[in-house]
Image (cartoon, rainbow, N blue to C red):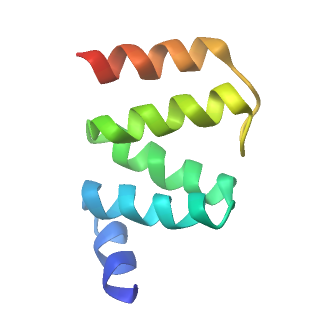
Amino acid sequence: MLQLKKLAEQGDAVAQFNYASKYLGAKEYDKAYEWLKKAAAQEMEMAYGQLAHLYHEGLGVTKDYNQIGRASCRERV
């Protein structure tokens, strides 16, 4: 797990997504959101879907249907 965190901190998008998934599983949505944003900023498609889910359910963020649309549109591109 320490290696995953190190890779995520170094900017590896896959590691960031996987690290976010760890937080999702632990229901630490605010931490997951931060890592998903970083992965999405690097065009990690799966991160867009997870961000859309967080916005839809209001998990760690305020429900925001505009953000869901943005995340979904990026995922389809």
Judge by depth and name the residue closer to the eye, 10 or 74. Answer: 74
**Horizontal side of residue 76 vs 49, given as left or right:** left
**Horizontal side of residue 36 vs 55, given as left or right:** left
**Horizontal side of residue 38 vs 63, given as left or right:** left
Going 26% across and 57% down the picture, which residue do you hit?
Answer: 14
20 relative to 70, above or below:
below
Going 66% across and 53% down the picture, which residue do you hit?
Answer: 29
73 relative to 33, above or below:
above
User: Residue 42 location in percent, x, y?
Assistant: 27, 42
Q: In which quadrant is the N terminus drawn?
A: bottom left
User: Residue 15 location in percent, x, y?
Assistant: 30, 64
User: Residue 9 location in percent, x, y?
Assistant: 37, 70
**Horizontal side of residue 75 vs 36, given as left or right:** left
Instruction: Kindly indicate the quadrant of the structure image that contains residue 45.
Output: top left
71 relative to 39, above or below:
above
Q: In which quadrant is the C terminus drawn?
A: top left
Q: Residue furthest front?
A: 25
Count the labels in the image: 0
Judge by depth and name the residue closer to the eye, 13 or 23. Answer: 23
Going 58% across and 57% down the picture, which residue do you hit?
Answer: 24
Instruction: Kindly indicate the quadrant of the structure image that contains residue 63.
Output: top right
5 relative to 41, above or below:
below
Going 68% across and 53% down the picture, which residue do you hit?
Answer: 30
